[in-house]
Amino acid sequence: MGDQKRVIGYWISEKKRQKFNWTEFEDVCAKEGFLLKMINIETSLESQGPIHVFFHKLTDILSHAEDGNKHAKIIVKRVQDYIRKHPELIVIDPLENVRNLRNRHRSYEMIHNGLKYDDDVFIPNFVEINSNCLPEIMDSFRENGIKFPCVCKPLIAQGSSDAHKMMVVFNEQGFSDIQPPCVAQNLINHNAILYKIFIVDDKYHIVERPSLKNFYPKDCELMNTIFFNSHDISKSGSNSKWSVISAEEHDLAAKPKFQVFEKIVERIEKIFGLLLVGVDVVIENHTESKCPTFKKCLSDDLDSGFESDKRKKQSTL
C-alpha cells in the first residue's frame, strides 16, 4: 500500500461524540499512520471505503433492531453486509458480541458461568422475573437465593433511558412494585463506593463514583421500595440522599486490591470477547453486621465485590 494511510472508520452518536476530544484523537491516529473518518451508516459503506478498522457504538441501534424497529434493522443489515464482504476488516467490537450486553440476565449468566471456579470474583444471586404473579415471584426468589434487600433492574440494558430506572425492594410488600420483565439481584453493602473500570484491550482506567448507601435488616422491616436512576446515583458529583452514609460507616470501607481488578479485566474480556467494555465493581465492606441476604456478589455496563475481615472478594454488578 506504500505510504497510503490506513482508515479507521467510526460511527458514534452525536451525543457520544461531544464527550470525546476528536481533534486530539485524530492527531494521535495521524502520528501512527491512520486516517480517522466518520462513517455515515444511513448510506452504503462500500462507497465510503476502503475502511481498514471499523470502530462503533451501535448498542442502541442493535437494541432497537432486536425490538423490531425497521429503520434500525436496515442499518444493522447494511453494516453486517459490509463486514461479511470484507473479512479482513477489524471490527471493534463484533456485533454478535456486543449483543450479549443487551439482556442483563444473559450477560449475568455468562459472567456466572465464566467465574464458576473463581474464589476472588463473583456475581450476586440473580433471577429473571417475567410475571406479576406474586406467588410466582416469591417462588423464583426462594429457588434462586434472592433475599432482601434486592435490586430490580429492567431486563433490557440498552436502547432507552428506561434501562437505567431501577428499584430497591425491601420486603414482600414491594413485590407489587416490580415491573417485569426485569432481573432481581441481591444487593450488598459497599459503603456507597462504586469503581468503574473502563477497559481497552489489556489496558484499563478506574474511576471512583458514588453508589447506593448501606441498608440493614431494620430497613427491610421499615422501608418502602426505593425508585432511582442508576445514572443519577453514580454520576460524577452526584449528591443523592441514597448515597449518604453515616460517619460511623466511613471506617467500614475496604480498600480495593488492584491485582483483583486486573483479574476482572482479564476475565470480562475473555467472557464477552470485547476490546472495549465497562464494568462496575463494588467491594462489600463489613460481613459481621451485614444484611443476611448477602454472601457473595458480581454485576453492569456490567458490576462486582465481596470483602470480609478474613477474606477479600470482588463482585461484579
Image (cartoon, helix red, strand yellow):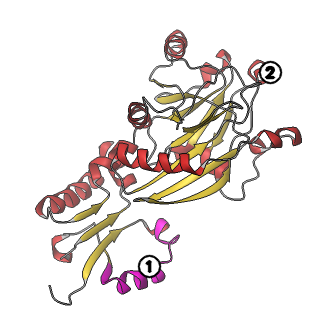
Residue 67 vs residue 115, the one in the foreground:
115
* In the depicted structure, whether residue 192 falls above or below residue 55: above
Looking at the rendered structure, which numbered label has been put on residue 25? 1
Left or right, 66 with respect to 44, comes to right
Looking at the rendered structure, which numbered label has been put on residue 218? 2
Which percent across, then down, holds residue 317?
54, 39
On the question of residue 301 being in view, the answer is no
Instruction: Give SS at disc 2.
Output: helix
- Lower sequence index among marks 1 and 2: 1
Q: Residue at x 29, y 71 (%)?
A: 40
Which segment is the magenta one? Answer: 16-36
Q: Residue at x 80, y 44 (%)?
A: 244
Q: Three-letter amino acid code at disc 2?
A: Lys
Q: Three-letter amino acid code at disc 1?
A: Phe
* In the depicted structure, whether residue 295 falls above or below residue 133: below
Left or right, 246 with respect to 39, comes to right
Residue 313 vs residue 304, the one in the foreground:
313
On the question of residue 169 being in view, the answer is yes
Please identify the quadrant where the N terminus is shown. Answer: bottom left
Residue 290 falls inside the magenta stretch: no
Residue 24 falls inside the magenta stretch: yes
Q: Single out the residue that lies furthest toward the right.
A: 247
